[in-house]
Amino acid sequence: MTTAAPGTPPHRPSTGRLYAVSDLHVAYQENRDTVEQLFPEDEGDWLLVAGDIAERAEDVEWALRLLAGRFAKVVWVPGNHELWTHPSDSLQLRGERRYRHLVEICRSLGVLTPEDPFPVWTGPGGPVTIAPLFLLYDYSFLPTGATDAASGLALAEAAGVVCTDEFLLHPDPYPTRADWCRARVEYSRARLEACDPGLPTVLVNHFPVVREPTSVLYHPEFAMWCGTTATADWPVRYRAAAVVYGHLHIPRITRYNGIRHLEVSLGYPREWHRRGKPEPLLRQVFPESELGREADRQQGAKLG
């Protein structure tokens, strides 16, 4: 029998399923309408929200309030868009202060964040520790021909690829976004090291925690704004049963080192108008769905 690690919050067996979604971008009315139609199948269902709900704090709060009122538990991690200080937002906090304000909004709604005790999912596929992470990026996913961040950013700019974060995501009080990322990596590593070693984990982060998912980007230079090489071994090191992420707007399920990585984004209306909405929109983390098994079969066929 597994003994809970010190500080593990009380939990009871769940009768539901563990779902995940990201990149809801509810500033778009069509996406907002879509979110209004999201309901659990069972009163015990949990939902992992992997960032980029919206740019304005009031829209983030609207979506989380709606979802928290429907699902047994909601877990949120920030995306880059929540961290923007957008000119149209009445909340003009920057950097760490903005993030902490969003955390307090979540706590007022009963939504768990990367700053709260990690919950344990005890439903199908459990028990597993759900580890919400806020890691950012440090420009270490270098494009071909780059030797460091500066040369990588120069190559990206020459290719016409510059992330809006460079103008709206402020790292205050850290000197740079890379410095903020390094601080978040150290903080998150310490929290993961303190988890019950007898339980597997589900790592939840807005950005992929390994670089491989960025290999399919239409603009490969954009990988510089997609994560950090510092977390490359985390899925294996921290016993991940699954990794949940968004950001890329390329919804799919892949495996690296035998571990499921689920990109769970909705994306912008112009994207899902072209390819269709992910079906289902709420991706099932546990129990593993037929969609996941089919992705395994397709990946195996390609490797074969």
Image (cartoon, grey):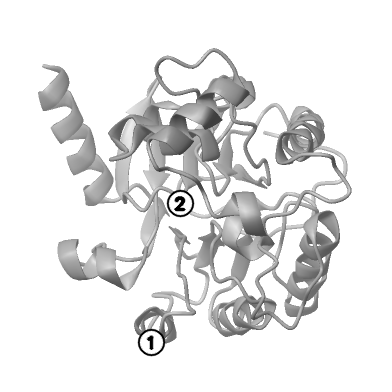
- In the rendered structure, the answer to whether residue 235 lies left or right of residue 289 reads right
- Mark seen at residue 77: none
Query: Residue tagged by mark 1?
Result: 33
* Secondary structure of the residue carrying numbered label 1: helix
* Secondary structure of the residue carrying numbered label 2: loop
Which residue type carries mark 2? Answer: Pro
In depth, the one of 74 and 97 nearer the eye is: 97
Query: Residue tagged by mark 2?
Result: 124
Q: Position of residue 107 (x, y in %)?
A: 79, 71
Q: Position of residue 258 (x, y in %)?
A: 37, 23
Q: Position of residue 249 (x, y in %)?
A: 36, 53
Q: What's the residue at 49%, 17% (across, down)? A: 146
Quadrant of the rendered image containing residue 129: top right
Do the residues under discs 2 and 1 have CB atoms within 8 angstroms?
Answer: no
- In the rendered structure, the answer to whether residue 159 lies left or right of residue 66 reads left
Which residue type carries mark 1? Answer: Asp
Upstream in the sequence, badge 2 or badge 1? 1
In depth, the one of 54 and 125 nearer the eye is: 54
Residue extending furthest toward the front: 158
Q: Is residue 170 above or below residue 175?
A: below
In depth, the one of 159 and 220 nearer the eye is: 159
Between the C-alphas of marks 2 and 1, the distance is 30 Å
Q: What's the residue at 36%, 58% (across, down)? A: 283
- In the rendered structure, the answer to whether residue 114 lies left or right of residue 221 reads right
- In the rendered structure, the answer to whether residue 190 lies left or right of residue 294 reads right
2 vs 1, front mark: 1
